[in-house]
Image (cartoon, rainbow, N blue to C red):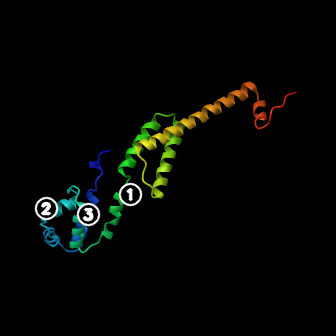
Amino acid sequence: MSDEKDVFRVTKELGLRLRSLRKRARLTQDGLARLAGRGWDHALVSRLETGHLENPGLGIVADYLRACRASFSEIADLLDTYTARPLPVEQEGREAVARVTEALPEQIGNQALAYDIKTTVARRAEGKPPLSSEERVKRVVNLAAAASRRKRLDILVKYLETEVGHGLAATSGSTFTSS
């Protein structure tokens, strides 16, 4: 995943919300630019409101809100949408794990994917840093290998029970005695 694609941008929805706040304050774009200061002009305000301002930074958004006598709480839901997104390292790990699980038998791949999701969510809830892609893949591969060994062992036990008889199951846990 490219870092350029994972930067805070003013979305169309955020731009519309900002425009609504400006209109509520009964300001024109020129009027808001004058109040914000710092050499703003109406073109900057327009680009911000239409979502065409690349990576504006919170300082610009804060100055805009201040000029409108608005607060971050009025756009908090939109900012929370951005901050709730997976971190780039989490997304890269998710993609790496998906490539591995797609190559596994379906049942084992599903188990491995569920394990990865569960551990990723748990780490986030516990406030732990995300694991690297390499570590996540390593854990999934280990889980898949263990699941595969269990499956082969189950097949072997069923084979032995069928070929040797059910006496094998009856003797498990008991000690053999000589007659």
Structural crowding at the residue carrying mark 3, measured as other residues with C-alpha within 10 Å and reported as few (<14), some (14–19) or many (≥20)? few
Residue displayed at 75% across by 34% down: 169
Give me the C-alpha separation between circle 3 and circle 1.
17 Å
Task: Identify which residue, 10 or 16, lies in the foreground.
Answer: 10
Is 121 placed above or below 150 here?
Answer: below
The residue singled out by tag 3 in the image is 58
Check contact, mark 3 vs mark 1: CB within 8 A. Answer: no
Q: Which label's residue is closer to the chain start, 2 or 3?
A: 2
Residue drawn at x 34%, y 66% as measured from the top left: 76
- Of the residues tagged 2 and 3, which is closer to the observer? 3
Viewed as shown, does residue 33 lie left or right of 109?
Answer: left
Q: Earlier in the sequence, mark 2 or mark 1?
A: 2
Specify the amino acid type for callout 1. Answer: Ala
Give the farthest residue toward the top. 163
Q: Secondary structure at mark 1?
A: loop
Q: Amino acid at mark 2?
A: Ala
For mark 3, give the secondary structure.
helix
Mark 2 vs mark 1: give the one in front.
1
Q: Closer to us: mark 3 or mark 1?
A: 3
> Mark 2 and 1 residues: CB-CB less than 8 Å, in contact?
no
Q: Which residue matches tag 1? A: 84
**Depth order, front residue of 35/90:** 90
Residue 119 in sight? yes
Residue matched to label 2: 43
Dot 2: element = helix
Residue farthest to the front? Answer: 178
Marks counted in the figure total: 3
The image quadrant where one finds the N terminus is top left
Disc 2 to disc 3, how far (Cα)? 18 Å
Q: Earlier in the sequence, mark 3 or mark 1?
A: 3
